[in-house]
Amino acid sequence: MMYRFGYYVVAVILWLLGGKIKKENKEKIPAAPFVVVCTHQTWLDIIYLAIAIWPVQIHYMAKQELFSKKWLKWLFTKLHAFPVNRENPGPSSIKIPMKLLKEGKVVGIFPSGTRKSEHVSLKRGAVTIALKANVPLVPAIYEGPKTFKEVLARKPKRVRFGDPIRLADGKKGTKEEIEKTIVLLQDTFETLKKQ
């Protein structure tokens, strides 16, 4: 309920202030459950991805620091976010998204971190979760404003979805399959940026 309310409020405000968002290849999105993975450069890509994929609701993996205050924990939980320790990921970083996917929901992960050392580990996490849950990875890229000032300047914005990456039967969870899928995911992001 809170997610739906938040979607309409934020979507209308951003539309009034910054104009329409272009949603490309939305027909490629499969039925839930799946893991949606998106490039990550700004807090706005979290919001615009949620707007672009609506009416599908995303359960976002978010850094645990965002849940430090009681009211923030309440808010982010209502907005379908769940915490993960990015520095020292424990069993919950796999357990919670696995449970959500088994319930037929959609998990959102931004696999590229701000530090180079995070890139491989975060991509591996997204791929491992999809492999273990036997669900496709849906790649997406966001291009547009990176600051609220750029939103007000009505800078063009778009979210482009790619073909779902379906993981090979019989090889799920092997190190080779994980590494192969990480490379495929990175190549897909680069291809989507050039289209």
Image (cartoon, rainbow, N blue to C red):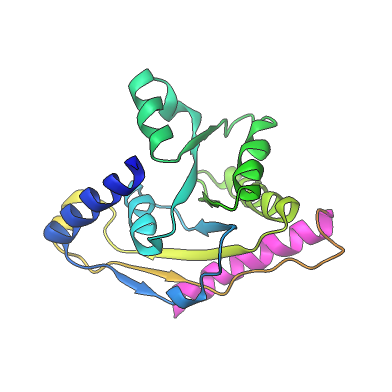
Q: Is residue 194 magenta?
A: yes
Predominant secondary structure in magenta? helix
Decide: is 39 above or below 102. Answer: below
- Left or right of 100, for residue 171: right
- Left or right of 106, for residue 1: left
Is residue 49 in view from this perspective?
Answer: yes
Point out residue 10 in the picture as x, y percentages from the top left corner. Answer: 23, 50
Q: How many labels does the image show?
A: 0
Q: Is residue 74 magenta?
A: no
In what quadrant of the picture does the C terminus appear?
bottom left
Between 59 and 49, the residue placed more toward the observer is: 59
Is residue 150 in view from this perspective?
Answer: no
> Hey, which quadrant is residue 137 in on the image?
bottom right
Point out residue 178 in the picture as x, y percentages from the top left corner. Answer: 75, 57
The stretch of residues the image draws in magenta is 174-195
Identify the residue at horizontal 15%, vertical 64% (top origin).
Answer: 154
In what quadrant of the picture does the N terminus appear?
top left
Identify the residue at horizontal 64%, vertical 29% (top origin).
Answer: 88
Between 6 and 24, the residue placed more toward the observer is: 6
> Hey, which quadrant is residue 139 in on the image?
bottom right
Q: Residue furthest right?
A: 170
